[in-house]
Image (cartoon, rainbow, N blue to C red):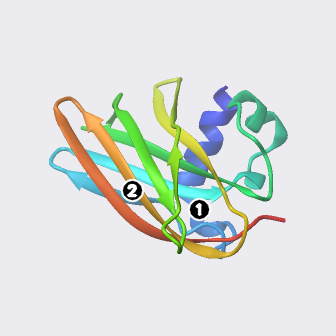
Amino acid sequence: MGRLALFVLTACLSVTAMAADVIKGDRQEKFGDVTVHYNTFNSTFLTPDIAKAAELTRSKNQGVINVSVIKEGKPQMAQVSGTVKDLTSQSVPLKFKQITEQGAIYYIAQFPVDQQEVRTFEIKVQNGDKINTINFNQELFPGE
């Protein structure tokens, strides 16, 4: 699992070096003293070993969203949920799973990417008593 954490960290920090038409880069939102980092990418960027370790499906038609919560430079546990909507407003719930290893905590979920289109994400992050919502649009492409 250490390789998975390394990959996700690398993806978060260097996504702009990857295919810009598939990955828009690490984004972040600040909520007081908590920063939520998030990004999306096609699951074909995962190596087969990493996908297997994370129990993710590696497919050109599957996207991945990665969310991490940081407070005072340290990873925080949170409850993460959300949905992704297509242009027809068809909503798909995101089922996040927590990955914890070597001082890193992050949440990943998969979603279908059947065709090139802009999707609307709504992510809810509960850290303590606060529930913060992040809304963003992302143009997605099926992988190769």
Disc on res. 122: 2
Quadrant where the image shows the C terminus: bottom right
- Drawn side of residue 46 relative to residue 67, left or right: right
- Residue 79's x, y, as percent? 36, 32
- Residue 98's x, y, as percent? 50, 29
- Residue 33's x, y, as percent? 17, 44
Q: Residue at x 76, y 58 (%)?
A: 61
Q: Residue at x 78, y 64 (%)?
A: 143
Q: Amino acid at mark 2?
A: Glu
Q: Residue at x 68, y 62 (%)?
A: 113
Figure quadrant of residue 114: bottom right
- Residue 112's x, y, as percent? 67, 55
Per the image, label 1 sits on a secondary structure element best described as helix
Q: Around disc 1, counting alpha carbons within 10 Å, would you say few (fewer than 14), some (14 to 19), or many (20 or more)?
A: many
Q: Nearer the viewer, residue 74 or 125?
A: 125
Q: Provide the residue designation for mark 1.
A: 15
3D distance between C-alphas at marks 2 and 1: 21 Å
Q: Of label 2 and label 1, which has the lower sequence position?
A: 1
Determine whether 97 is above or below 125 in the image: above
Q: Are marks 2 and 1 in contact (CB under 8 Å)?
A: no
Q: Residue at x 60, y 49 (%)?
A: 10
Quadrant where the image shows the N terminus: top right
Q: Amino acid at mark 1?
A: Val
- Drawn side of residue 46 relative to residue 24, left or right: right
Figure quadrant of residue 50: top right
